Image (cartoon, rainbow, N blue to C red):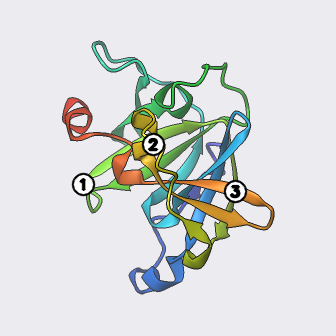
């Protein structure tokens, strides 16, 4: 899949409005999650990850993506889920944060699709007071009979974690 990677950086700037309400849907375990497509720069197949010492347990290391070193986060571990072996469907979703200043790779079980979820179909996350993972959720998107968990890309990493990744 790395040769057939999906490059989303070449989307024209004026298409910003066409990206509104567009989400990349991916799966972790039995749940579907979404990220706003405007944060996604590309999707690549799993590749060799170089471990970096003294990083949080969910930071698997870094990859060299066309000469750029990008930290890689295993989203299962980030969400305190049971880790699993990577397979041919495992992907790295590369997202761009802080107006392109920071790129981070997110390891997901599989990428589903790019889909539209209109703002009227997005509900605020429940106020559970549960752990930190609730802070990552921007909302819950209703898609037919299904509910997709919409993540806030800017809250997947906290300021101190961005600093530890050199961002």
Could you tell which of marks 3 and 2 lies nearer the N-terminus?
A: 2
Residue occupied by mark 3: 147
Residue occupied by mark 1: 101
Q: In this view, does 131 lie to the left or right of 100?
A: right
Circle 1 Cα neighbour tier, 10 Å, few/some/many (<14 / 14–19 / ≥20): few
Closer to us: mark 1 or mark 3? Answer: 3
Could you tell which of marks 1 and 3 lies nearer the N-terminus?
A: 1
Q: Residue at x 39, y 35 (%)?
A: 132
Q: Which residue is drawn at 24% across and 54% down?
A: 101
Could you tell which of marks 2 and 1 lies nearer the N-terminus?
A: 1
Residue occupied by mark 2: 134
Q: At numbered mark 2, what does the secondary structure look like: helix, strand or loop?
A: helix
**For residue 4, above or below residue 115:** above
Residue 114 position, x and y percent, is 65, 64
Q: Is residue 4 left or right of residue 19?
A: right
- Where residue 67 is drawn, which disc sits there? none
Mark-to-mark CA distance, 3 and 2: 16 Å
Circle 3/circle 2 CB separation < 8 Å: no
**For residue 160, above or below residue 59:** below
**For residue 70, above or below residue 15:** above
**For residue 95, above or below residue 72:** below
Q: Which residue is drawn at 46% across and 85% down?
A: 17
Quarter location, residue 119? bottom right
């Amino acid at each position: 899949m790395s040769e057939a990677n999906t490059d989303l950086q070449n989307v024209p700037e004026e298409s910003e409005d066409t990206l509104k309400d567009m989400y990349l849907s991916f799966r972790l375990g039995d749940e579907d999650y979404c990220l706003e497509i405007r944060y996604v720069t590309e999707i690549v197949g799993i590749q060799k990850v170089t471990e970096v010492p003294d990083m949080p347990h969910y930071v698997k290391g870094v990859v060299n993506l066309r000469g750029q070193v990008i930290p890689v986060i295993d989203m299962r571990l980030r969400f305190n889920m049971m880790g699993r072996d990577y397979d041919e469907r495992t992907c790295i979703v590369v997202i761009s944060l802080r107006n392109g200043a920071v790129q981070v790779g997110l390891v997901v079980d599989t990428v589903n699709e790019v889909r539209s979820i209109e703002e009227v179909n997005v509900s605020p996350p429940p106020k559970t007071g549960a752990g930190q993972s609730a802070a990552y959720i921007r909302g819950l998107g209703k898609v037919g009979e299904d509910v997709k968990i919409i993540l806030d890309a800017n809250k997947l990493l906290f300021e101190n974690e961005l600093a530890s990744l050199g961002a």
